[in-house]
Image (cartoon, rainbow, N blue to C red):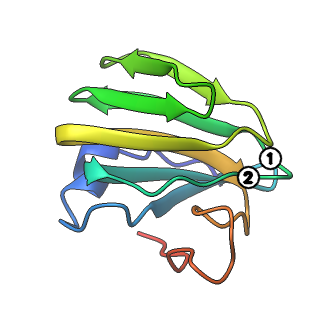
Amino acid sequence: MAFVVDLKTKLATFTEAWQPRTVALFNGHDIMVAKLRGKYHWHVHPDTDDFFLVLEGDLQIDLEDGSTVSLKPGQVYIVPRGIRHRPRAHLEAHIMLIEPTGTPNSGDPLTAAPRRVV
């Protein structure tokens, strides 16, 4: 069954930051949207790369080597698995994420946000 997902409409259904929402499934992966404000904590995904597509706002991703990747709307960055990183957004940013279903957003199941589907 094919359907259209309007990311802007899905983002309008919540206000919480750092709480990704699954909006579609693709070959065993969650397609998610999230709102980001402030700094997230340093974390690592040992088994998966971390995909970020900025939809609105500006996003910075600090990397363990001391560098920072700055992203604007329409830009994608993939943090390779095993690289410690910290996303941050001075003002609110909206992003799309793609991760294998069940991947904890914090890299650790004990601190991960629960999976939410909208």
Q: Residue at x 34, y 44 (%)?
A: 7
- Disc 2 secondary structure class: loop
Neighbours of disc 2 within 10 Å: few (<14), some (14-19), many (20+): many
Left or right of 94? Residue 1 is right
Residue placed farthest to the right in the image?
A: 47
Against 36, residue 53 (above or below) is above
**Amino acid type, callout 2:** His
Q: Nearer the viewer, residue 2 or 91?
A: 91
Residue 48's disc number: 1
Determine contact: label 1, label 2, CB under 8 Å. Answer: yes
Against 113, residue 7 (above or below) is above
Residue ID for mark 2: 45
Left or right of 13? Residue 67 is right
Q: Position of residue 49 (x, y in %)?
A: 75, 39
Q: Nearer the viewer, residue 31 or 63?
A: 63
Q: Residue at x 67, y 62 (%)?
A: 107
Q: Position of residue 104 (x, y in %)?
A: 66, 67
